[in-house]
Amino acid sequence: MAMTIKVLFFASAREAADGTSEIQINLPPDQSTTSALRKRLADDFPRLAATVLDEDSITLALNEEYVGAGEVLDLKT
């Protein structure tokens, strides 16, 4: 079963994502990591690629808690 992730874009990330403020991305269970999410965002938004792939430039949060590089995205129920 695919994991649906709501992604919110702020500030320069929103600008690089062509003004998009929010999207939903479906990731397969075997690709539900922060690295896979970053790759998918880079593929979907080429102008955002350099920034989103640089883990020092974009911080990811899940359920209002920061998540580190390569962590599995474990949604709260």
Image (cartoon, rainbow, N blue to C red):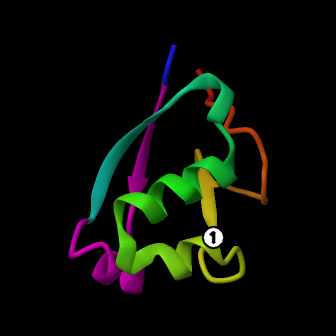
Which quadrant is home to the C terminus?
A: top right
Total numbered labels: 1
Q: Amino acid at mark 1?
A: Thr
Residue 49 drawn at (x, y percent): 48, 74
Residue 1 drawn at (x, y percent): 51, 13
Q: Is residue 44 above or below residue 54?
A: above
Picture quadrant where residue 33 is located: top right
Q: Going 29% across and 83% down the picture, which residue do you hit?
A: 15
- Which residue is at the far top? 1
Q: Is residue 53 above or below residue 25?
A: below
Residue 66 drawn at (x, y percent): 70, 59
Is 59 magenta? The answer is: no
From which residue to which does the magenta span run? 3-20
Q: Is residue 77 above or below residue 31?
A: above
User: In this rendering, does residue 7 appear at all?
Assistant: yes
Q: Is 46 left or right of 35, judged from the image as shown?
A: left
- Which residue is at the far left? 19
The residue identified by callout 1 is 59
Picture quadrant where residue 63 is located: top right
User: In this rendering, does residue 10 appear at all?
Assistant: no
Q: Going 78% across and 59% down the picture, which residue do you hit?
A: 69
Q: Is 42 left or right of 68, judged from the image as shown?
A: left
Q: Residues within 10 Å of mark 1 (few under 14, many from 20)?
A: few
Is 14 magenta? The answer is: yes
Nearer to us in this view, 10 or 27:
27
Q: Secondary structure at mark 1?
A: loop
Nearer to us in this view, 30 or 58:
30
Q: Going 49% across and 21% down the picture, which residue do you hit?
A: 2
